[in-house]
Amino acid sequence: MLETYEWPTNGRAAIEGQGTCVGATFDRGQPRLGWKTDECETLIRCVNTCFRHILDQHGIAFHWASLQINKNSVSRRHTDRNNEGASLIVLFGNFTKGAFRMADGSLELQHTGEILTIDGTQPHESEEFEGERFSIVAFYHSSTASLHTNHQERLRDMGFCLAHQSIPVSPKEEDRILIELCCGPNSQLSQTTSH
């Protein structure tokens, strides 16, 4: 599903490749929804359903209002100044090398489909890779509380978990279908939601 979208060149100085932020962001001096949020709504719902299911399985409370989606990108050492709290990162694709790591060596993510919890305000980077590589980072953007109420409700409707919002206990049938669209019908996540 990730490969069906046209991803723009990433506008961040520390990142080479393609990608964008969907959900809450800050641009041109004001909080708003990322410009590809409408176009990517199906993907956003799928990713958020996957994250919610995994978090619920493990009893983890986590809040996020943004997804940074990267395609074939390599990030030089940098920090994310607009993140509040922990972030989740997951890798997808068919690639070799391309590990994500915290600059202090404390955490590293090399394999697709695994989720790592990080503090994006601390220095981190990714290495060069061969093949096609996607990364998705779920995080709580510092501008979220300043968004118009209608935008906050829209984020909740798309499955983001804003502060003071509970996470559903189990996925519904339509959530399982979205998981299959995102991860494939034979993925481990699809199998655990089909029971």
Image (spheres, grey):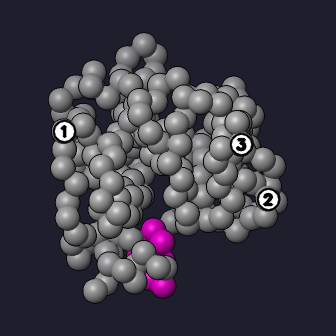
| Closer to us: 182 or 6 | 182
Q: CA distance from mark 3 to mark 2?
A: 16 Å
Residue 103 x/y as whole percent: 71, 36
Residue type at mark 1 is: His
Of labels 3 and 1, earlier in sequence is: 3
* Residue located at (32% from left, 42% from top): 63
* Tag nearer the camera, 3 or 1: 3
Span highlighted in magenta in the image: 180-186
Classed neighbour count for the residue bearing mark 2: other residues with Cα under 10 Å, few (<14), some (14–19), many (≥20): some
Residue 167 is at least partly visible in this image: yes
Residue shown at the point (48%, 85%) measured from the top left: 186
Query: Mark 3: which amino acid?
Result: Gly
Pointer 1 residue: 164
Determine whether 190 is above or below 11 in the image.
below
* Amino acid identity at mark 2: Lys
Callout 3 crowding tier (Cα within 10 Å): few <14, some 14–19, many ≥20: few
Q: Secondary structure at mark 1?
A: loop
Which residue is label 2 attached to? 97
Q: Which mark is residue 105?
A: 3
Any part of residue 42 in sight: no
Of all residues, the one furthest to the top in this rendering is: 29
Task: Give the spatial CA distance, label 3 vs label 1.
Answer: 33 Å
Quarter of the figure with residue 139 = top left
